[in-house]
Amino acid sequence: MTRGRNQVTQEVKKGALRDLALIIYRGEGLNKAAHIVSKKYENEYANLMPVSRLKREWKSRGEWLLDVFEINKDNILEQILTEQMYLKGQLYGLIDETAEVGEKRLILKDIKNLNKEYIEMLVDMGIIERQPDKLEIAGAGGGPLEISALAKAAENWSDDDVDVDAADAENN
């Protein structure tokens, strides 16, 4: 039995559209991504997903994008949290496997960034409220003293920025 020119199985179509989206979201242009995917779905009998069809489908991605990645709007936060917990578990496993302190610090920074991204997403969705980035203390004149700039600078400091031996020599 042969299929008509535009008939492909839902499985093939979903796979092609998922591949197209992944390539585009990795930074490739639509034209090149469509050619790559079209070639992948070509065999000696037919091109199941021609470039023109992929480009046309991309314009209506709002209709199929969640479906091809099997994203359920009702539990998207659970899905993201589950994925982040998995990623953090993998990162903690890497910490256990490495002996190098520098590598461990980089991995911990990745974990911190995962947490930060998750919190930002929750704020953007209105699920949690952002707390102020500044701390006000009564200054000498009774007015507020803003220290958020110092706090932000301290966030970027690392142990490598301080020469402990030189600081000890200055103090003695």
Image: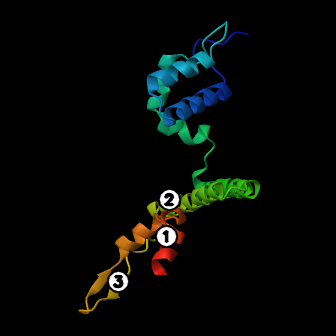
State the image quarter where residue 40 is shown: top right
Q: Report the residue at 73% width, 10% height from top.
A: 1
Q: Name the amino acid, label 2.
A: Met
Q: What kind of element bears circle 2? A: helix
Q: What kind of element bears circle 3? A: strand
Q: Is residue 40 left or right of residue 120?
A: right
Q: Report the residue at 49% width, 70% height from top.
A: 166
Q: In this view, does 169 lie to the left or right of 81?
A: left
User: Which comes before the other along the chain, label 3 or label 1?
Assistant: 3
According to the image, label 1 marks what residue? 166
CB under 8 Å between discs 3 and 1:
no
Q: Which mark is residue 136?
A: 3
Distance between the Cα atoms at labels 3 and 1?
34 Å
Q: Report the residue at 45% width, 76% height from top.
A: 170
Indicate which label's residue lies in the foreground, 1 or 2. 1
Q: Report the residue at 41% width, 73% height from top.
A: 151
State the image quarter where residue 67 is shown: top right
Distance between the Cα atoms at labels 3 and 2?
26 Å
Indicate which label's residue lies in the foreground, 3 or 1. 1
Of 70 and 149, nearer the camera is: 149
Q: Name the amino acid, label 1.
A: Ala
| Local crowd size for mark 3, using a 10 Å CA cut-off: few (<14), some (14–19), many (≥20) | few
User: Which comes before the other along the chain, label 3 or label 2?
Assistant: 2
